[in-house]
Image (cartoon, rainbow, N blue to C red):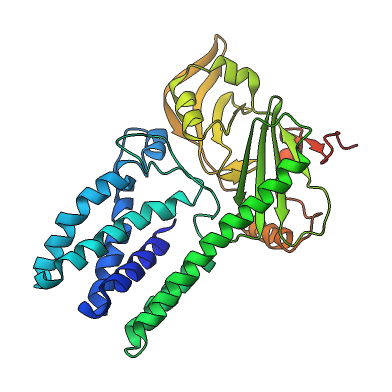
Amino acid sequence: MDSISQIALGAAVSVAVMGRRTALWKAALWGAACGTLPDLDALIDHGDALSNMVLHRADSHALFWLSLLAAPLGTSFAWLLGERQHLRRWVLATWLTLITHPLLDWMTIYGTQLLRPFSSEPLGLGSIFIIDPLYTLPLLIGTGVALRNGAHALRWNALGLLLSCAYLAWSALAQQHVSRLAREQLAEHKVQALLVTPSPFNTVLWRIVALTPEGYLEGFHSLLDAPGPLRFQSYSRGAELQEALRDHAPVQTLSRFSDGFVKLERDAAGLVRISDLRMGQEPHYVFSFVVARETPQGLERLESAEAAGARGDVRAGLAWLWQRAGGDVEAQPPHESARVMQPRAVQAAGQPAP
């Protein structure tokens, strides 16, 4: 999740654990600091853009390492404040604020390596977008009011935590509902893998990506849509390029990290890009990397992947998102991929649209 959400969660958790044993502002400040601590790994340069991506949310987000860190960190803070009589509570507050950070990140689709050093598998439920005001606002309001309201401070803080957790539970239930609809309507396709994740800033409009032997399908479903078949567009995943670059290290790395949700494409300049299909939508993806270039002698592989991600027209995208989330199934995404990629519309029954 974004830094503001993690800071708000850390502050709320710390206030809830410490209660009246210390000044609320001390608990909130310490919780906010611990809540954002794991993301400091973003400051580490691992040598290239792709490595920086896959090694973010790695060791600094591992439950094992954070648990080991909690005791000395919490003890140091208790001694620094002269509150050794509450040392156990400070250690507990530190541990909970540290581990709730990666657990919240696990709810997003990015991929959090919770189980290091025992496993480097990136885990992600993908039921909430990395920025969602409806998750963050209850935490900010609850803790903010708590710091100003002495009589019912802890109740306000607890209410904010309760509402934010309930929203996470709702997002998981909504994801399962949309996944079931997608699986039912794609039953006649040879779907190899299915991804269902919310569009930016909400849990009403969901993006569906289905990998097939021929490529992949992309569609959207709003919880406000009228009953009817889901609509999909089909796209190529660059089968020839995937075959040619199958053993290329950057291609293997991103394919493994994204659980196979990647595509390769060659642009007009002859540059070959690999894109993570999980984050973005056609034709713009946040994480795209140039991994090779076309030359007269054939494909020349790049030893180091170069970042080439894009977000497209944000204003037009937000206007479409609002319209589509409201249930307008005719709203067209603001992109030109229909001409560039030549997609084929696919109906729920699996027949090409006329």
**Is 293 or 259 nearer to us in this picture?**
259
Q: Residue furthest top?
A: 297
Q: Is residue 104 visible?
A: yes
**Is 131 or 80 nearer to us in this picture?**
80
Vertical placement of 247 versus 14: above or below? above
The residue shown at (63%, 57%) is: 174
Q: Position of residue 260 (x, y in %)?
A: 55, 30
Image quadrant assignment for residue 279: top right
Image quadrant assignment for residue 271: top right
The quarter of the picture where the N terminus appears is bottom left
The residue shown at (25%, 45%) is: 65
Vertical placement of 137 versus 283: above or below? below
Q: Is residue 336 visible?
A: no
**Is 16 or 354 nearer to us in this picture?**
16
Residue 242 left/right relative to 45 = right
Q: Position of residue 330 (x, y in %)?
A: 82, 54
